Image (spheres, rainbow, N blue to C red):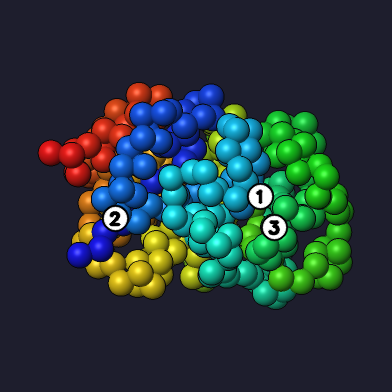
Amino acid sequence: MRRMFVTDLDGTLFTDDKRIDNMDLDALEYLGEIGIVRSFATGRSLYSFQKAVEKMGFDRSCKDLPVDYVVFSTGAGIMECESGNIINSYSLNSEDVIRITDYLDTLDLDYMIHRPVPDTPYCIYRQQSESRNPDFASRIELYKDFCTKIDYQEEIREFGQSTEVLAIVPSDCGHRTADMVEQYLADYSVIRATSPLDGRSIWIEVFNRSVSKSKAVSWLAQMLCIERQNVISIGNDYNDLDMLHWAGQGFVVDNAPETFKETFVVVASNNECGVSQAIAMLYKN
C-alpha cells in the first residue's frame, strides 16, 4: 500500500523567518525511510521556491531536501525532484488572458501576467493604484529583473499564453474583491491566498480551470497509483482548503484561520514544528 504526505510551505513547513526546522526535516527524512512519497505543494512559482530554498542553504535542484515532488504555482506545474523534470503543467491561452484582464481593469486592480511554465518569472504588470498597494510594489521588486510595466490593453493582447494572472488587493477589501472575481470568472480557477510578503494583503490568482492544489495532488497520486484515502495533507491558508478537503486526512497548523480548525486536525504552529507533530501522530505510534 503506497502512501503520500503533502505539505504546504509558507506558514506551514516554513517558519515565519523562512526556514525549515531541523525537527521537520528529520521527520520528512523518516517518511522517505519508510517508503512514503513526500510532496511540497506551494503557491510559489518554481523560481520563487528555488530562490527560497537557496536562501536557506539548500541546492535549487532539491536533491539535498527530503522531498520527492514539488507542486508549484498552486498546481499549475509539478516537478519531479530526482530528475528535475517538470512532469505536468497548465496555462491560460491568449483569449483567456484578455478576458481576465479586461475584467480586472474594470475593478482598477493591480495585476501581473506570468509567462507559461517553465518561464514563469517573466511577466508584465499593470499598476493602477499608485502608492496605495505596497505589497504589489514589493512583489514587483522581487521580480524586477524579469518584469515589464505596461499601460494599455493592446500590449496584453500581444502577450500570448500565461501561467496565471495575479491581482494583489489590500486586506481591507481583499476578500470582498476575491468574491467578485470568483463569481465573474467562474469558468477559471480563482484562488485566494494571504500574501507571503506582508501577511495581510490578499492575492487573487486566476488560472486555467484545471489548476488547484487538490487537482495537482490527485494527478500525482493517480500517476503513482496511490489511493486518495492514503494521501495526507497539511496546510494553513485559503489556497490549501481544496487540498485539505480532498485528502484522506487533513491537518492544519495552529496559525491557520480559526474556521479551519473546526474541520481539520490541529497541530502545533509552523514555528513549533506542526509538520513533524502530524507525522508523529500518523506514523510513529
Between 181 and 33, which is closer to the camera in this rendering? 33
Please provide percent x and percent y for residue 241: 36, 50
Q: Secondary structure at mark 3?
A: loop
> Which amino acid lies under the numbered mark 1 shown in the image of this protein?
Tyr
Between 227 and 62, which is closer to the camera in this rendering? 62
- Residue 37 falls left or right of residue 161: left
Which residue corresponds to the image point at 43% horizontal and 28% vertical from the top-left?
21
Number of the label disc, if any, that sits on residue 162: none
Please provide percent x and percent y for residue 197: 61, 33
Q: Secondary structure at mark 2?
A: loop
Mark 2 vs 1, N-terminal side: 2
Mark 2 vs 3, N-terminal side: 2
- Residue 117 falls left or right of residue 283: right
Which residue corresponds to the image point at 60% horizontal and 33% vertical from the top-left?
57
The image quarter in which residue 215 lies = bottom left
In the image, which is nearer the foreground, mark 1 or mark 3? Answer: 1
In the image, which is nearer the foreground, mark 2 or mark 1? Answer: 2
Does residue 201 sit above or below 82 in this rendering?
A: above
Real-space Cα separation, disc 2 to disc 3, in angstroms? 32 Å
Does residue 102 sit above or below 176 in this rendering?
A: below
Query: Are the two marked residues, 1 and 3, in contact with CB atoms closer than 8 angstroms?
Result: yes
Which residue corresponds to the image point at 43% horizontal and 45% vertical from the top-left?
66
Number of the label disc, if any, that sits on residue 47: 1
Q: Is residue 116 visible?
A: yes
Question: Label 2: which residue?
Answer: 35
Real-space Cα separation, disc 2 to disc 1, in angstroms? 28 Å
Does residue 44 sit above or below 82 in this rendering?
A: above
Question: Label 3: which residue?
Answer: 120
Query: Are the two marked residues, 2 and 3, in contact with CB atoms closer than 8 angstroms?
Result: no
The image quarter in which residue 272 lies = top left
> Which amino acid lies under the numbered mark 3 shown in the image of this protein?
Thr
Give the position of the C terminus as an image quadrant.
top left
